[in-house]
Image (spheres, grey):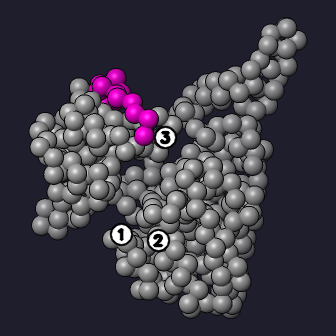
Amino acid sequence: MRATKGAGRLLAGLAAGAMMAASAAAAADAKLPGTMVWTAYDLGSSGYAEASGIANALMKKHDTRVRIVPSGTSIGRLLPVTTSKASYGYLANETFFATEGTYDFAVPQWGPQDLRIVLGRLAGGGMSCAGDLGIKTPADMKGKRIGYVKGNPSVNVKTDAYLAFGNLTQADIVPVWFGSYGALKTAVIANQLDCFGSVTTSANAREIEASPRGLAWPEFAPENKEGWAKIAQVADFFQPYKETAGAGISVEKPKHIVGYRYPMIVTYARQSDDEVYALIKGIDEVFADFAGTTGSAQNWAMNIAGKPPADAPWHDGAIRYLKEKGVWDAEAQAWQEKRLERLATVMTAWDEATDKYTTWRADEEKKGNKVNPEESWLKFWNDYRMEKGLGPAS
């Protein structure tokens, strides 16, 4: 699992990949493996439902069997892929944290992971706010009580990004921490909280809409270039998104919120280009058979799910097919190259920090100072990331 000297391997792999050109015959012969294991969110989640819908559609058309392993934790979803017990994971923002070596992946056993996207279904999210406060833009959340969830970096990073659009940080609002995501909705209705990050179609949002406080979605104007640049400084996988469905939202009354990818079909860079090509091609061919699985499953269409930004670089096998479909363009390739450069930088920083930490720890032990490896490494890695301008580790 540990990313040792990963940047060198990454760059070597890129160089090798650049020298290889798959012939049309090879592409035509690419076949799905006889058996695949995928991971996904828990039973009942949209991620699991859509993974099941795609798997069933593939198995009806192709000579392949798919088994889906559900997990409620980011480690539980990625570890089987890391150890090759599963080929692909239907993941969320743990993909970004894993490539960065942050949060759950900041420990020595993990570090930055060389992950790749096959497809990423576009989803919309924003700030679910009480409707009695007159909040219309992210900047209007200044001084308001904003919800955060302990141990849930995916929720918290999104919230920080939404605040950044309005030129706000946690210092400009009143952060209120909860032990579970479900508690946020109840707190808004009880007037103990003003806003929290949410998707528009959730039952939580509809309950707030029906409550005496009502519901408001502050809008993220697509033309606000400064706001989107500030979001990118927190995480670079967000984009403008026009939502037409959800609580208080319709085709007639759309809202400009934030687009991101969930779920994403994720694998490692080491995965066979031909297999990834066959998988994405197979998904495209059976799209009509699973597009109605959930209200958002139509966003698996190639021209939507096959474009950056996302939480990691795209896989070369996927790019090959997306180019054939006319989806992958110069803008997508420019994003890809920038994202690969970022990943290489982070992996190099991890290797450097690991070497420096080993030396520092040995020096401390020679001085007779006791070192707690778990606490000292996280601080060391966090400080090194900040020194290199990479942002905090947690």
Is 165 located above or below residue 64 in the figure? above
Write down the residue under mark 1.
Answer: 296
The location of residue 292, given as percent across then percent down, is 37, 79
| Of pointers 2 and 3, the one earlier in the residue sequence | 2
* Amino acid identity at mark 2: Glu
- Chain-order first, disc 1 or disc 3: 3
Q: Residue at x 40, y 52 (%)?
A: 238
Magenta-drawn segment: 166-180
Tags 2 and 1 touching, CB below 8 Å: yes
Mark 2–mark 3 distance (CA, rounded to whole Å) = 23 Å
Q: Position of residue 130 (x, y in %)?
A: 18, 41
- Residue at mark 3: 153
Looking at the image, is mark 2 or mark 1 earlier in the sequence?
2
Cα distance between the residues tagged 1 and 3: 24 Å
Please name the residue shown 56% across and 84% down the image. Answer: 58
**Where does the image place residue 378, in percent across and percent down from the top left?**
65, 28
The amino acid type, in three-letter code, at marker 3 is Pro
- Which percent across, then down, holds residue 198? 33, 49
Q: Secondary structure at mark 2?
A: helix
